[in-house]
Image (tube, helix red, strand yellow):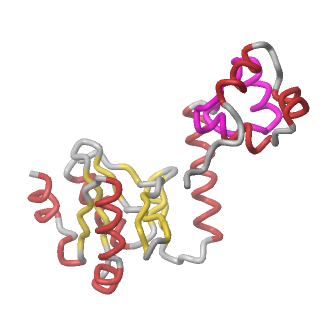
Amino acid sequence: MTNKPKYDYKELQALIDAGNSYRSLRRLLGISSRTLWLAQIAGHIRFPEKNQQRLYALGVLTHSLHTEETKTRLSISACTRLQKNSKYSKNTEYKPGVILESSYEVRVAEILDRLNVRWEKVRRGYIWNDNDKIRRYIPDFYLPDYNLFLDPKNDYLIKKDKRKIDSAMELNNISVVVLSNNEITESFIKNLLL
């Protein structure tokens, strides 16, 4: 049995294109703000630009209107907050806006920087199947030029997370290399990327 959407998005979009506002849609259809927001985030409906601006100003929508400068400032602020208030004592602000959560991550980042390899800290999770429960796996580094994820781990976590990582790779069609303590060396990573 598949879940059928409660609202016809084409009909909703037609009402929006006819000039109905966010508020009038809520009154007219009895639709919740959250439902409209989720439909908009998922790309099912789109409000005209002036309504979009108004929705951001009202705080109904909270993404994608920030400039790159504002995003960087907010990221640095969040990292500072995380570093001060985190239950993880090893969090390190590696560079402005980038928090690394272990000494292994710091070592990998330093090596990648020395090798001039472009990397990103992964923020998006990838699904994996945990006995029919869908969970999220977040590798530590993404190397966009190689379309490869690196995930440094200690020996215990390598064994513990093997099933999770294998499932995430299969379900999301991604490549993840798990690095043990011994493999976090410049020569190993350089050979890996050749």
Q: Quadrant of residue 172?
A: bottom left
Kindly identify the residue that appears in the image at 65 percent across and 25 percent down.
10
Q: In terms of depth relative to the viewer, which is nearer, 45 or 68? A: 45
Position in image of residue 192 (x %, y %) = 13, 59
Q: Residue furthest top?
A: 18
Q: Residue furthest bottom?
A: 156
Residue 91 as seen in the image, left or right of residue 166: right
Q: Quadrant of residue 176?
A: bottom left
Asked if residue 158 is positioned above or below residue 55 in the image, the reply reads below
Position in image of residue 107 (x %, y %) = 30, 67
User: Does 175 lie within the magenta span?
Assistant: no
Asked if residue 14 is positioned above or below residue 40 in the image, the reply reads above
Residue 188 as seen in the image, left or right of residue 95: left
Residue stretch in magenta = 39-65
Kindly identify the residue that appears in the image at 21 percent across and 46 percent down.
146
Residue 31 as seen in the image, left or right of residue 72: right
Kindly identify the residue that appears in the image at 66 percent across and 30 percent down.
9
Q: Residue furthest right?
A: 27
Q: Quadrant of the N terminus?
A: bottom right
Q: In terms of depth relative to the viewer, which is nearer, 99 or 28? A: 28
Q: Residue furthest front?
A: 1
Count of numbered labels shown in the rendering = 0
Kindly identify the residue that appears in the image at 29 percent across and 68 percent down.
166
Position in image of residue 174 (x %, y %) = 29, 54
User: Does 54 lie within the magenta span?
Assistant: yes
